[in-house]
């Protein structure tokens, strides 16, 4: 965890995954609410974090957007990632 710059939490049967990650780090956390086997999703618990505990949240079952968002955040300090994101957004790279 020391070298990680961003974390992505996937929550389907429990919202505690993303909240647990937030509690362990001061790095950015992206939450991906997913539909579980009962058809329930945890979107509201992912976006309803208390004040001072921000979690970026992408759409339900959309881990690909979490990866793109993480790339966009990392590209702020790494110009090599900008080129990869440009290709990705131009659909030159298949997710």
Image: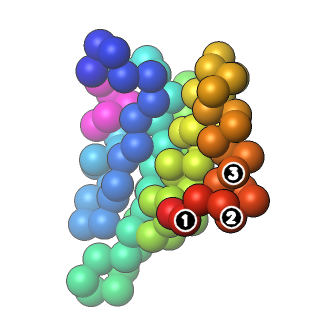
Q: Secondary structure at mark 3?
A: helix
Q: Is residue 62 left or right of residue 13?
A: right
Q: Secondary structure at mark 1?
A: loop
Residues at discs 1 and 2 in contact (Cβ within 8 Å): yes
Q: Residue at x 58, y 38 (%)?
A: 71
Expressed as whole percent of the image width and height from the top left, the position of residue 35 reads 37, 76
User: Disc 3 marks which residue?
Assistant: 87
Residue 78 is marked as none
Residue 93 lies, with reference to residue 39, above or below; the image says: above
- Location of residue 83 (image quadrant): top right
Magenta-colored stretch includes residue 22: yes
Residues at discs 2 and 3 in contact (Cβ within 8 Å): no
Expressed as whole percent of the image width and height from the top left, the position of residue 63 reads 46, 59
User: Disc 1 marks which residue?
Assistant: 94
Q: Secondary structure at mark 2?
A: loop
- Location of residue 42 (image quadrant): bottom left
Expressed as whole percent of the image width and height from the top left, the position of residue 62 reads 50, 65
Q: Residue at x 65, y 17 (%)?
A: 77
What type of secondary structure mainly makes up the magenta span?
Answer: helix
Q: Quick one: label 3 or label 1, which is nearer the N terminus?
A: 3
- Observer-nearest residue: 85 or 54? 85
Question: Residue pushed farthest bottom?
Answer: 38
Span shown in magenta: 20-24
User: Disc 2 marks which residue?
Assistant: 91
């Amino acid at each position: 965890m020391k070298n990680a710059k961003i974390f992505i939490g996937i929550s389907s049967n429990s919202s505690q995954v993303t909240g647990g990650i937030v509690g362990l780090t001061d790095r950015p956390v992206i939450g991906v609410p997913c539909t579980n086997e009962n058809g329930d999703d945890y979107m509201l618990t992912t976006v309803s974090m208390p004040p001072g505990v921000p979690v970026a949240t992408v759409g339900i079952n959309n881990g690909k957007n979490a990866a793109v968002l993480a790339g966009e955040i990392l590209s702020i300090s790494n110009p090599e990632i900008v080129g990869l994101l440009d290709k990705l957004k131009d659909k030159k790279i298949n997710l």
